Image (cartoon, rainbow, N blue to C red):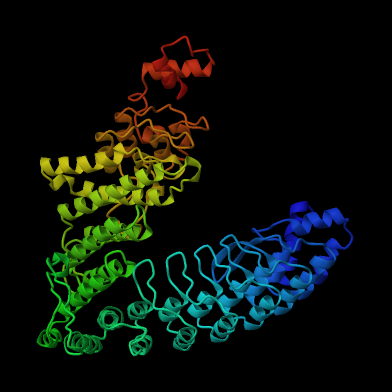
């Protein structure tokens, strides 16, 4: 049996708790060989890591005492579908709730404050899943209760968020910092409010918890309103020493908005808004006027906040107006930077789309997208999600145009203006992303998000090519202007692919559910070439767009012809020395293009030079050297 097979057998035995099988393979080996085998990783983890993860005490004891396995050597483990990188054995045992294994490791000197790659300690892992006895044991053996993970979340915060009362009470008895803030400014009180743990929240307040704001300006009271935890809101607003009148009114109004959008409880929302209005205008000799709304928002159907009881009563007869009130109130209180503001705008737009009101959906989504691009960093996942949603919506509308939707409405055509507007915003996101990444050292850049936005932009452009036959010359010029902005960036996505590479590849497929936009796309390739895309560009594998087209089964003749007519070389080689023809497995070249039409005397001469390895550098003009090298 080969060495790799031995490693797999030992790993599997440790993972499954097969001590006898483990001994068969290890007892007769030398010390060095045993150390090598138990220190080897399979699927990112050592045998000891897996034994601790799965609670196999006897296996862990054997690996430590007989095999001298390194009790600090970390590995990758999976918990609830999430891969935890750099997890020491003690962390794994604590997270999984295996107290006997935890005791074993600590007895043999395991570091109780060791951390994963995200700086999570064994104590924090035990707090996460509520393993109280392990928490107590680790603290008794020197675990630091204040070590936070990379996000600044402490053990107390995670216990509060997960609702583990005994652990929270125990940590507070040890004087855990009740008002400590995470990287994003939230406290344990925020975590209680978001999770709905009223009993723990009361405990925190007894220990001096304050009503601080996080990086979004959110108090725990507002956090409870956003998440719809009415019992938390009702408790907090009765604490005048902790909550001001302004905070109380805002909380009730925001909770009402949550009732509309999240709970779909219109009557409950109206009651909350009435209470807030009474408090605002009648609850004190000092009236709390709402901020003046200088301009209305078209996406909100120009709704203005209602400021009188009569107006509130009228809302019940107009549910759509009530939904707009919820959006206006949420934006005023949370502000445009808060993720929930744009999230619920997008949610409301999606509801309109489901009801066949595509125009309202597009208006709301555009408003949310503008908000995200104004407030968030370039390439933010939320902005990407908005752009992708547009791509799905437009693809669906184009594929279902003229048909009757499930709600009995006919699906309208996608308008040129809507498509071009969103494409422009997508290209802007690419430009902003390129600028941001240029400020980061080359070795530290992650182009994953940039690649995704590039692909989204190409899908939107591809959809526009479907409209070209119906467009005026002026409209076509506008499309070319936007696509030129994209090409001009010379963006490189995954594996060094340019926009033209992606247009010629199946790998750019993004919206597979709808047939309106299929990749590769000869029409999109033509448009990219028209505005200046480089047909000779090479990716990290030395492939041109023509090489990638050869991988498509079957290769579309229109795509190959488009590239060749724009100057691609039929006999150009990729990084592996293969030509377009050699990559056409199972398909004859003459079935796609006429090779004689695209074989020039220059190409033939270059091939002769390369075939016979003639020394051409220095013997031909420098401008021809690159041409010869690619043949």
> Residue 158, image x and y in percent?
52, 75
State the residue lying farthest toward the top. 619
- Residue 545 appears in the figure: yes
> Residue 517, image x and y in percent?
29, 52
Image position of 305 (left or right of 557): left
> Residue 629, image x and y in percent?
47, 22
Q: Nearer the viewer, residue 325 or 11?
A: 325
Image position of 212 (left or right of 15): left
Quarter of the C terminus within the rendering: top left
- Residue 391 appears in the figure: no
Look at 50% across and 80% down and name the residue there: 160
> Residue 218, image x and y in percent?
35, 72
Look at 45% across and 77% down and name the residue there: 191
Q: Nearer the viewer, residue 322 or 14?
A: 322
Q: Nearer the viewer, residue 560 or 111?
A: 111
**Residue 179 drawn above or below residue 517:** below
Quadrant of the rendered image containing residue 52: bottom right
Image position of 409 (left or right of 396): left
- The mark total stands at 0
Look at 69% across and 57% down and name the residue there: 41
**Residue 258 drawn above or below residue 526:** below
Q: Nearer the viewer, residue 234 or 411?
A: 234
Quarter of the N terminus within the rendering: bottom right
């Amino acid at each position: 049996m080969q060495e790799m097979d031995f490693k797999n057998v030992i790993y599997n035995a440790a993972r499954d708790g097969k001590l006898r099988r483990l001994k068969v393979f290890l007892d007769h080996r030398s010390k060095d060989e045993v150390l090598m085998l138990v220190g080897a990783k399979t699927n990112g983890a050592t045998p000891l890591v897996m034994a601790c993860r799965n609670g196999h005490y006897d296996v862990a004891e054997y690996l430590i005492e007989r095999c001298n396995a390194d009790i600090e050597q970390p590995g990758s483990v999976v918990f609830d579908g999430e891969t935890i990188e750099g997890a020491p054995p003690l962390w794994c045992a604590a997270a999984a709730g295996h107290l006997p294994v935890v005791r074993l490791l600590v007895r043999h000197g395991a570091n109780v404050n060791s951390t994963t790659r995200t700086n999570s300690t064994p104590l924090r892992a035990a707090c996460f899943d509520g393993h109280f006895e392990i928490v107590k044991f680790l603290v008794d053996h020197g675990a630091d209760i204040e070590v936070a993970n990379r996000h600044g979340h402490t053990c107390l915060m995670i216990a509060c968020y997960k609702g583990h009362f005994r652990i929270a009470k125990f940590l507070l008895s040890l004087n855990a910092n009740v008002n400590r803030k995470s990287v994003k400014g939230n406290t344990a009180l925020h975590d209680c409010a978001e999770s709905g743990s009223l009993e723990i929240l009361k405990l925190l307040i007894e220990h001096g918890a304050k009503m601080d704001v996080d990086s979004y300006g959110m108090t725990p009271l507002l956090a409870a309103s956003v998440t719809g935890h009415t019992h938390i809101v009702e408790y907090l607003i009765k604490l005048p020493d902790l909550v001001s009148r302004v905070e109380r009114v805002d909380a009730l109004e925001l909770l009402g908005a949550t009732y509309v959008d999240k709970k779909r409880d219109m009557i409950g929302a109206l009651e909350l808004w009435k209470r807030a209005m009474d408090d605002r205008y009648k609850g004190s000799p000092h009236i709390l006027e709402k901020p003046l709304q200088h301009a209305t928002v078209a996406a909100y159907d120009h709704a203005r906040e209602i400021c009188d009881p009569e107006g509130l009563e009228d809302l019940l007869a107009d549910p759509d107006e009530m939904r707009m009130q919820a959006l206006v109130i949420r934006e005023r209180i949370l502000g445009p930077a808060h993720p929930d503001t744009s999230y619920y705008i997008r949610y409301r737009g999606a509801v309109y789309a489901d009801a066949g009101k595509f125009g309202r959906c597009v208006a709301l989504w555009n408003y949310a997208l503008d908000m995200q691009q104004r407030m968030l960093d370039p390439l933010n996942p939320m902005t990407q999600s908005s752009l992708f949603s547009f791509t799905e919506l437009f693809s669906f509308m184009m594929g279902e145009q003229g048909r009757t939707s499930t709600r009995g409405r006919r699906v309208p055509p996608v308008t040129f203006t809507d498509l071009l507007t969103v494409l422009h915003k997508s290209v802007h996101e690419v430009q902003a992303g390129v600028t941001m990444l240029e400020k980061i050292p080359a070795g530290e850049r992650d182009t994953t998000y940039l690649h995704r936005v590039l692909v989204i932009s190409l899908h939107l452009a591809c959809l526009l090519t479907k409209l070209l036959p119906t467009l005026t010359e002026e409209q076509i010029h506008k499309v070319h202007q936007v696509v030129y902005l994209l090409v001009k960036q010379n963006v490189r996505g995954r594996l060094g692919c340019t926009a033209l590479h992606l247009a010629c590849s199946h790998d750019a497929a993004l919206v597979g559910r709808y047939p309106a936009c299929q990749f590769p796309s000869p029409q999109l390739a033509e448009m990219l070439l028209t505005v200046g895309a480089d047909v000779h560009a090479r990716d990290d594998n030395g492939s041109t767009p023509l090489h990638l087209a050869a991988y498509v089964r079957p290769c579309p003749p229109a795509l190959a012809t488009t590239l060749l007519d724009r100057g691609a070389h039929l006999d150009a080689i990729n990084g592996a020395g293969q030509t377009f023809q050699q990559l056409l497995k199972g398909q004859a070249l003459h079935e796609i293009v006429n090779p004689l039409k695209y074989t020039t005397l220059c190409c033939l001469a270059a091939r002769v030079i390369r075939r016979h390895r003639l020394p051409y550098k220095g013997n031909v003009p420098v401008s021809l050297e690159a041409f010869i090298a690619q043949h």
